[in-house]
Amino acid sequence: MKNAHLWNCPNCDLANPVEPRQAGQSLVCAGCKKEFEAPKLRELTQLPLSNPEGKPSKQVSGSAKQTGSSAMFAIGLAMAIIGGAAGGTLYRYASSLIPDISPDEYVARQNELLDTVPINQLYARWEELYAQRHVPEWQESEVKSLYKQSGYLKTIATGLLAVAAGGVLMTGFSLLSSRRSLQEQ
Ligand SMILES: [Zn+2]
């Protein structure tokens, strides 16, 4: 009998253990077999416990479990929200760096654009590239590094989204375990 309180029968004065869930209900006294109405919950919980040694340890383990699962819930929720937001934002940013076409197509498109640039501007760019690398490659190396960068960022974003998924699992698990410990009490 969990968390039962001792309530004295108004007829024979026998201490009957009454559980909180039985508060206010009609019960039969174990001694005189007469029916009586159990006290209301507020009144009942002020009466002495039928197992005073058993209760505190039960309560401690229950509340420790409760604290553990609510901490897990908070951490899981934070992981889900922060990981999801950061991962999602980073993934969108990484995708925005490059168009949704292959690197070769992108280079070809950029080279077409290059052909329309006036020669004085183009020459200035050529000089710039020549000064940097001595071998002007126009778009190729830049496009390649952009795709590489985007791929790298997408990998990090995927990691963050995995953290978010872990957080969702943790939140769900803590909800399940707190429900279970409530049922145990
Ligand atoms: Zn009685």
Image: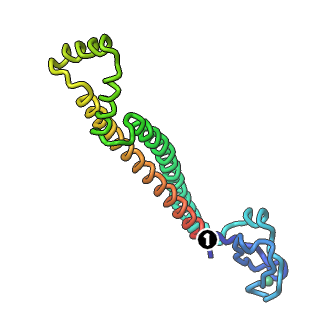
- Residue 166 percent coordinates (x, y): 43, 53
Q: Residue at x 29, y 34 (%)?
A: 108
Left or right for 33, reference 154? right
Displayed quadrant of residue 114: top left
Q: Nearer the viewer, residue 113 or 149?
A: 113
Q: So how many labels did they put on this image?
A: 1
Name the quarter showing ligand 1.
bottom right
Amino acid at pointer 1: Asn
Displayed quadrant of residue 5: bottom right
- Residue 96 percent coordinates (x, y): 42, 36
- The answer to whether residue 37 is above or below residue 83 is below
- The answer to whether residue 121 is above or below residue 160 is above
Q: Residue at x 40, y 44 (%)?
A: 160
Q: Nearer the viewer, residue 125 or 82?
A: 125
Q: Secondary structure at mark 1?
A: loop
Q: Nearer the viewer, residue 121 or 53?
A: 121
Q: Residue at x 81, y 80 (%)?
A: 26
* The C terminus: image quadrant: bottom right
Q: Nearer the viewer, residue 77 or 133?
A: 133
Left or right for 68, reference 55? left
- The answer to whether residue 155 is above or below residue 42 is above
- Residue 9 percent coordinates (x, y): 80, 78
**Circle 1 is placed at which residue position?**
51
Q: Residue at x 74, y 75 (%)?
A: 22
* The N terminus: image quadrant: bottom right
